[in-house]
Amino acid sequence: MMRRPTRIAATFPALMVLFALLGITLTAPAALGAAGISAGTSANPLGPPAVGAAAQTAAVTAATTTPFSFAVIGDNPYGSTALAAFPGRIGQLNADPDVQLVSHLGDISSPIDCSDGYYATIKSMFDTFVDPLVYTPGDNEWTDCHRAAVGQANPLERLGAVRNVFFPVPGLTLGQNAISVNAQYGYEENVTLSEAGLTFAAVHLVGSYNDLAAWTGLGYTTPTSAQLSEESARNSADKALIQSAFASAKADGSRAVVLLMQADMFTGSPGSTYKTAFKSIVQTISAESLAFARPVFLFNGDTHIFLMDHPLTTSKWLSFYGLTKSVPNLTRITIEGGSTLDEWAKVNEVSTSSVLQVQRVLFK
């Protein structure tokens, strides 16, 4: 039997009115704490530092008592072996009775294949997910097509193709049990949705410096004017989407905000182009997270090695991005990916102050 995720169809006040008309009396839900995440396979779960008494005791009217879990994958399938295994891996997620939503964080090929035929192959596989699939593109889908092994082309032309193939109906997820989402006008891949007291935002932010890297495969040594224009416009749209997601989370009384993107904005010892690509996004997330004062979880792919940390509590990243205030309620989770991928992330909502628990589940 196909499953659909638990839906938050109305806020508690609206339900109070409805049930009053039916002669039913309800008691307001108890306030829930806000903080944290733990790793399901670790003996020493990692959670963010305390964020203050006000955040810990904030009432959450949209909280759910129904168990809710979602899966996060990305940077997959890489190569012919992984492509052949991909249907079976989808089947494993489909078979998990707890999972009610899946997110793919982009990068669907390596060596890079930007051909229409390959896009169609992956789209047909995406269509076999039983649960709603929220997909956000990666750099291998379009940004890096200037150096693709197959289907080398202008990245902006390929961006248009990605949108046509993978987002045929704006405002509707992929998957056999697709659900409605709030799609951003002109950027149908950018979506927000609310599930089980959580506010999700899929943000189209990619590696390769968010497409500020020169298209060397096409003979360019610096970014083109069209490239710079597209990046600037999409960056502005991304910031607006993030702000909108947090506004919705506040209005709905969400327990937490979940951000989904491909780019890893906190890796290595980056230079000026990296900072230019991601600084305004990081600053937006920082400001919104502090104002929200409840847990914020940032899931990203791109760098392939599982990591869960609190980057905006470290002097390295605060200084790099020009921030003066620590953001202890932001937890970043980089999911495993690439050619050695052998696991997926199962994220479970819990009733405790941790809000979410991450389990690293091996593919069979």
Image (tube, helix red, strand yellow):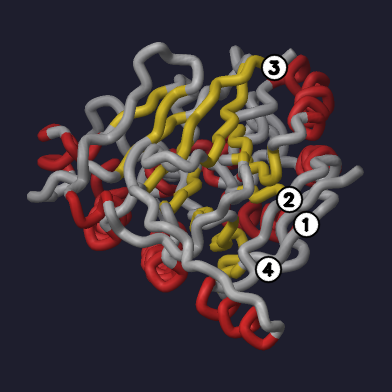
- Which residue is the site of mark 4? 171
Q: Disc number at residue 132?
A: 2
Dot 1 or dot 4, earlier in sequence: 4
Dot 2 or dot 3, earlier in sequence: 2
- From this viewpoint, which residue is outermost toward the left? 324
Specify whether 261 is left or right of 361. left
- Secondary structure under the numbered disc 4 in the rendered image: loop
Dot 2 or dot 1, earlier in sequence: 2
Dot 2 or dot 4, earlier in sequence: 2
Between circles 3 and 4, the one closer to the viewer is: 3
Q: How many marks?
A: 4
Specify whether 310 is left or right of 167. left
Q: Are marks 2 and 1 in contact (CB under 8 Å)?
A: yes
In percent of width and height, residue 354 lies at 39, 38
- Which residue is the site of mark 1? 178
Pointer 3 local density, CA inside 10 Å: few below 14, some 14–19, many at least 20: some
Distance from disc 3 to disc 4, alpha carbons, whole Å, reads: 31 Å
